[in-house]
Image (cartoon, rainbow, N blue to C red):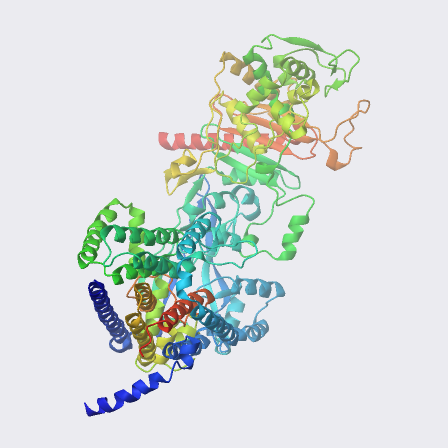
Amino acid sequence: MADFQRSAPDAKRHLRQGPGLWVKLRLDPFLLVLIFAIMSFGLLVLYSGSGASEVAVQRQSIRYGLALLVVIFITQMNLRHVQRWIPLVYVAGLLLLLAVIFFGVGAKGAQRWLELPGLPRFQPSEMMKLVVPLMVSWYLASRPRPPSLTHVLVSVLLVATPVLLIAKQPDLGTALLVGSSGVFVIFFAGLLWRYLLAAIVIGAAGLPLLWMGMREYQKQRVLTFLDPESDPLGAGWNIIQSKIAIGSGGVNGKGWLQGTQSHLDFLPETHTDFIVAVLAEEFGLIGVCVLLALYFLVLLRGLVIAGSAAHPFDRMLAASLTLTFFVYVVVNIGMVSGLLPVVGVPLPLVSYGGTSAVTLMASLGLLMSIHARRPQRT
Amino acid sequence: MPWLKMDSQRQEVGQFKARLWWALLFIVLVFVGLVSRLIYLQVIQHQHYVTQSDNNRQQLQAIAPTRGLIYDTNGILLAGNRASHSLTIVPERLVAGRKGIDPMLAELAEVVAIDQDDIKRFKRRLNQPRRPFSPVTLRFQLNPTEIAQITVNQHRLPGVRIVPELVRYYPMDAGFVHALGYVGRINDRELAKLDGINYSATHHVGKLGVERFYETELHGTVGHQTVETNARGKVLQVLERLEPVPGKDITLFLNAQLQQKAVTLLEGKRGAIVAIDPNTGGVLAMASAPSYGANQFVTGISNANYQALRNSDDLPLFNRALRGRYPPASTVKPVIALAGMDTGIIPRNYSLWDPGYYQLTEGGRFYRDWKEGGHGRVDMHKSIVESVDTYYYAIAHLMGNDPMTKYLAKFGFGQVTIADQPEATKAVLPTKQWKRINRSASWFPGDSLNLGIGQGFLSATPTQIASMTMVLANKGQWHQVRMIKEIDGQAVTKVSDIGRNDPKQPSDIKLKRNSDWNSLHKAMIDVMHGTKGTGRRSGANSSYKMAGKTGTAQVLGIKQDDTYDADKIAERFRDHGLYIGWAPVNNPKIAIAVIIENGGGGSSAAAPLARELFDLYVLDAKSQAQSLDKAEGS
């Protein structure tokens, strides 16, 4: 008690010295340190997962650099001025998603990309990961909370429309992320528990009806999706091999660059969606737990930012972005370890690839920006 | 009252913070779940997965199904499978990994013969998408000496494996390739189209003909097994096995003996023979000459050999029976006569005086008959027996295009008549519309004259001509012309029985007067057995009766004042000889079309070949039937 009393005035004095360097830069040192730690660990694993490819590591580093620029750009924006453009951007996003369905290009049976003349190829669904939570937050922020049933239903519509368009491409991973980011906003707007309960009950009751309405081949497809190991030559191969990689890693791992599963080409997509299997094989349980701890700290920081935000818009957005980050982690690791069905969700800040890294960093940038305009205690 | 607003705001913030706590609880619970899963995999199940990953001892291998066999109608094997040993490399097992491939190839070249072609194709296969640890073939068909040499040197060739597999083998090789087609290595384009899982252990796919059409039935369903291997990939133990389902066996109508005879008869010639059983529509023989060996395509033909085949002037790769477009010439005269009679445009007793030529107008162009000086008075019967061109110029002029093309269509011209030969073409049936579209010109009377003698724009494949012969022999009754007789012992009367699309086939021909068939048959019998019949030399001295029609197709237009002199004209410009016919006449067992390119007249070049085939098929069937009778009687 005495300690506390003595130290409290000191802390106040520190605050009185005026805004520090970080505040001026509007960046959050906590998040930045965590991001750098995850990225460095990621590059280490990527080097191994890409078959000791220095080119891959270089490219990924360049992407990280670009993504950091995106963070700085977003943190410098004034959120209040940006807000009024949100509905317009949302409508534009929906139109782009429609355009993907009609004019999109893609590979492996999915249409995800849009090629507009004069612009580089891009994935409209990717930007919806940010636009949807922004839109729902904007909508609910100017309405009484907890939201009335009408407002909840409008919000659900705002979420469901882009989700269905994305699921049609088909891109289940992105649809899942976009959908959950929107649903989290509704939850944090103070959605009444009874509505939440009702939604769960209706969903649970609807599933058997949907199942009975499906044709035999559709059922078969769902079953293979849920249990890929029933199809060992096809969809199950990846899961079987990644489980072997994780399990054989043990507590301590086989050592960096020593993973047999990844280096003998048994493991698929070792540098993208399945990179955590490489990590688990080479660094063992300890390695994965370190990564999970870093992720947990990011989430904790996100929740703290959400808790200290003043405006309802900021609060809901920050909490939703944090929880979406959490979904990335859980779906990816759950999939690779055989707990969840296979959907294409990358491991945040670790998987090789530019698009998802930029979106993720943009959402972390939004978090920092929210943090920067929290009420300053004086 | 601002305090009320403050209060509700505080209440809301409190509620939000409560939600954050709930979220944190959720996150913690899920993370605990994830960590538990990892502990389960990495601690509790650790040993299990270590075993599995230990040099990946357990491997899932796809097992190729055995390809279905193809038999002739009497159960003689036409396409079988034989063991072949391939030299393969598993790149993942090389000491230096992929980097070790070139040194290994150099080392192997000292042990067995490997040429640049092999290496080029090996590298191509290597770069195709494949399952890790699956062997990549370097050379096929190792001989026993080579196998021994590799085995002896195995210790210094880690990653090299000899893989036995079953590959297609055609016992009769060249003679049957135009009837059966062949299988070959799956190429990139086919790989994209095929079901990747079902073909994951299959290396060959039907490329042409029956092999291609019945690919689904012949291929079967892939199986798989989980095996335990040692570090070098040698199988120690099979843990679990799902047997592949072998492909179905196929029986064709093809008669190997007849086919072989047809091939022998065509030796040294360019041409085609197609024989059909008029009772079923089954193809008894389908030969095209010259031909090429099918077996070389199974294991991969060398580039030099392939170029030689491609560049040969005689076009051995070209399937004349299915794709050769020939003017059917006089062989269509029975159909033209029938068109005239059945439409009523030409009276059945129509006759004319033949001076040896025909003119559309007084002083106009001469349309010559093949016989200088003419045939005198000619009626329908004589016009067929002696193949009088003048008669057909006249009735063609009277009819014009429509009746002739309508009746030719009823006999299958301008359509693909065979159901299960994907390469078959429909050639050309020149309707007025066809000429307008393809020649941008209207139909002239002179075109009708040429059509009347089966020349000009009209063309047909030997298979189409044989189909026409079948319908003539059947007095208008169609059967689906097809190779397939049975699949796995189940009779196939139409390819739609096994879920394929039937070709559009004309319906059976019903004449206003059925007796017209009889007069046609009588005339065609006299072609073979009459004193003046054009095919009489081939019909003579037979114990059974046959019906037929000869044809001679001009390859080169003869100028008005020239007389035809076969010797002076270069071989390539000599006439094509054609023949159609069936036997025996009272109960047709076989209908034949013969075409000999640049062979000269049909009566001398084509008809004698058909006679030999008739003799073989009819007499042999007769003697077989007799011996059967005897066996039953005793």
Image vertical order of residue B44 relative to residue A311, above or below: below
* Left or right of residue A79: residue B481: right
Is residue B592 visible to us here? no
Q: Quadrant of residue A328?
A: bottom left
The C terminus of chain B lies in which quarter of the figure? top left
For the point 31% across and 64% down, which residue is it? A320
Front residue of B13/B263: it is: B13
Front residue of A96/B629: it is: A96
Is residue B71 visible to us here? yes
Residue B375 image position (x, y, % from top left): 71, 14
* Left or right of residue B445: residue B61: left
Front residue of B228/B30: it is: B30
**Circle count:** 0
The residue sitting at the right extreme is: B561
Front residue of B205/A367: it is: A367
Image vertical order of residue B459 relative to residue B215, above or below: above
Residue B277 image position (x, y, % from top left): 48, 30
Residue B245 image position (x, y, % from top left): 36, 52
Image vertical order of residue B325 relative to residue B5, above or below: above
